[in-house]
Structures are given as structure tokens and as C-alpha cells.
Image (cartoon, rainbow, N blue to C red):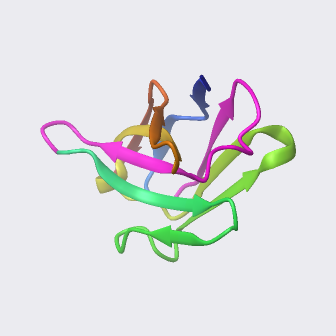
Amino acid sequence: QVRLVESGGGLVQAGGSLTLSCAASRSIFEINDMGWYRQAPGQQRELVATITNGDSRNYADSVKGRFTISRDTAKNTVYLQMNSLKPEDTAVYYCWGARRWPRYDYWGQGTQVTVSS
């Protein structure tokens, strides 16, 4: 099993930046897809960004042009660079990974991001 641990969350003013990191307990080479989801209070968990092991990226419309996802296989880490943050970006951000076959999903414990207006 691979354990995912997020870090980098915190409090930031609107317009500011944060970088989230997701460190895996061992090699992420076997994990085909990785990404970030978020969940605001009273809301469903939603996709923020994903990246495949071929570096194909996908973003939610709400974060396109502001967030950038990247992965460093050598460091077993996935990053989410968040710029031009808005109060509506406030949520708990979860790292996610998926092995396609046999299918298995990995989740981190979450890190809080709060954007003040």
C-alpha cells in the first residue's frame, strides 16, 4: 500500500499563492494517475486537477490558468501550485492517486486551505 501525505496548506489572502505537496510513502511509479480534489463545508468533494504518469494534465474550469499540477517521480511527490487564490478556493484539499489495474484508489488525509477576502 502507498500512503499519501499532504502538506503546504494554510491561510492566505485573496490574490496570494500556495503550493501543496503530496508525498507518497514509496514509489509512485505504479500509480497511473494522481491529482487533487477539494471539499468545502457543506459541499461535495470535487476534482481540482489530475496528472497521468505520461504527464497529461486535466483541470477543473474554476482553476484553469491559476493552478498548476506537477509530479516528480524521483521524489515520489505531486505538487499543486495555486496562484491568484480566491475565497471560493477555501476547502480541504485531498491528494489522490489511482492504479488502473487492478483498480485501486489512494487518498491522503487532507490539508486545509483558507483564503481570506
Residue found at the far left of this picture: 42
Residue 77's x, y, as percent? 72, 41
Q: Answer yes or no: is residue 85 visible.
A: no
15 is higher (above) or lower (below) than 94: below
Residue found at the far right of this picture: 74
Residue 24's x, y, as percent? 68, 31
59, 32: nearer the viewer: 32
Residue at figure coordinates x 71%, y 40% from the top left: 28
Residue at figure coordinates x 48%, y 60% from the top left: 49
Residue at figure coordinates x 49%, y 29% from the top left: 108
Is 30 magenta? The answer is yes
> Horizontally, is 13 left or right of 52 in the view?
left
Count of numbered circles in the view: 0
What is the span of residues highlighted in magenta in the rendered image? 15-43
35 is higher (above) or lower (below) than 95: below
50, 9: nearer the viewer: 50
> Horizontally, is 28 left or right of 65 in the view?
right
Q: Quadrant of the image for the N terminus?
A: top right
Residue at figure coordinates x 59%, y 23% from the top left: 3
Residue 98's x, y, as percent? 51, 45
99 is higher (above) or lower (below) than 26: below
Residue 15's x, y, as percent? 49, 61
Is 68 magenta? The answer is no
Quarter residue 42 falls in: top left
117, 81: nearer the viewer: 81
Q: Answer yes or no: is residue 45 visible.
A: yes
Quarter residue 69 falls in: bottom right
